[in-house]
Amino acid sequence: MPATAIITDSDSSIPAEISERLQIRQVPINIHFGEETLRTGVDINDGELFARVDRGDPYPTTSAPSPGQFVEAFQGAFADGAQNLICYCVSAEVSATYNAALQACNELPDKDITVVDTRSLSLGQGFLAIAAAEAARQGASRDEILSLTEDMGGRCHLFAALATLKYLAKSGRVPTLQASIGNLLNVMPVLTIRDGTLDLLERVRTRKKAWPRVVELALEAAGDKPVERLGIIHVNAPAEAHQFLDLLSQSLEPPQDTFLAELTPGLSVHGGTGMVGVVFIGGK
């Protein structure tokens, strides 16, 4: 175990195999089907979530991990030999997760814990935790890790296209009538991260136009500098994610360590099946 342990939450969209290899602990976001509570990445994934939705179960809601869940993760890291830890949380603009992690610190007043509001989500958050864990394994100090990830956070971009508006309507993010009209017209919203939230950037007609538009936006954001890290996110759509990566690769050379990642249920309840997008850290 490196001197600095890295903690995050499951809204980071980090695949389990990467978390295990880098010893990143992910505290799960809670998913609620009525009175039933399930933990993201432990009890439920995107495929299982939408299988239940499509068979008519009540549309799920989400909640932040409890402070106790963070205390358990923090104590586990210290028990494994960590001298200090950094916890990278999903944006406080979209979740109470950051505040729950701060409350957990109060339960461990004698421990060296830093909690970071990434002001991001999905791999925008996840890439910071991954880079932090890699740096920790190479012997970087806590302050060096925080400086590294603060710089990366300012170069993070996310662009994604929804396949339908119906899930945003079910989650209460757009009016049902507006979603129905949008679906009738085959409108595909393009999303980005803005002011710490996943926000509607523009509306595009049909997937045939939406995917190239997402690629255009990524190219504009990347500029003429090589991309440092890149991941393709999707909701229950691995085949489409591979197709999108092929399209993107025609215009932008992805790094060798590019990977595909599920959005994960804490976020996918809002985007819905078929969402595909790209998250990347631009070059310096």
Image (cartoon, rainbow, N blue to C red):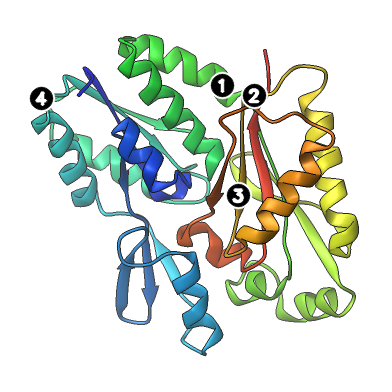
Q: Amino acid at mark 4?
A: Asp
> Which residue corresponds to the image point at 60% horizontal and 46% vertical from the top-left?
197
Instruction: Measure how far apart labels 4 and 2 are at the Cα level.
Output: 34 Å
Instruction: Measure how far apart labels 4 and 1 are at the Cα level.
Output: 30 Å
Element class at badge 3: strand
Frontmost of labels 4 and 1 is 1
Q: Considering only order in the chain, which callout, 3 or 2, is on the residue closer to the N terminus? A: 2
Element class at badge 1: helix
Of the numbered discs in the image, which one, if any, rests on residue 233?
3
Instruction: Measure how far apart labels 3 and 4 are at the Cα level.
Output: 38 Å
Are there few (<14), some (14-19), or many (20+) residues within 10 Å of tag 1?
Answer: many
Residues at marks 2 and 1 touching, judged by CB atoms closer than 8 Å: yes
Q: Considering only order in the chain, which callout, 2 or 4, is on the residue closer to the N terminus? A: 4
Q: Amino acid at mark 3?
A: Ile
Residues at marks 2 and 3 touching, judged by CB atoms closer than 8 Å: no
Frontmost of labels 3 and 4 is 3
Instruction: Measure how far apart labels 2 and 1 are at the Cα level.
Output: 5 Å
Of the numbered discs in the image, which one, if any, rests on residue 152?
1
Element class at badge 4: loop
For residue 217, which quarter of the picture?
top right
Instruction: Measure how far apart labels 2 and 3 are at the Cα level.
Output: 18 Å
> Which residue corresponds to the image point at 54% horizontal and 67% vertical from the top-left?
269
Of the numbered discs in the image, which one, if any, rests on residue 155?
2
Measuring from the top left, give residue 11's x and y in whole percent: 45, 49
Is 99 located above or below residue 45 in the figure?
above
Residue marked by disc 4: 110
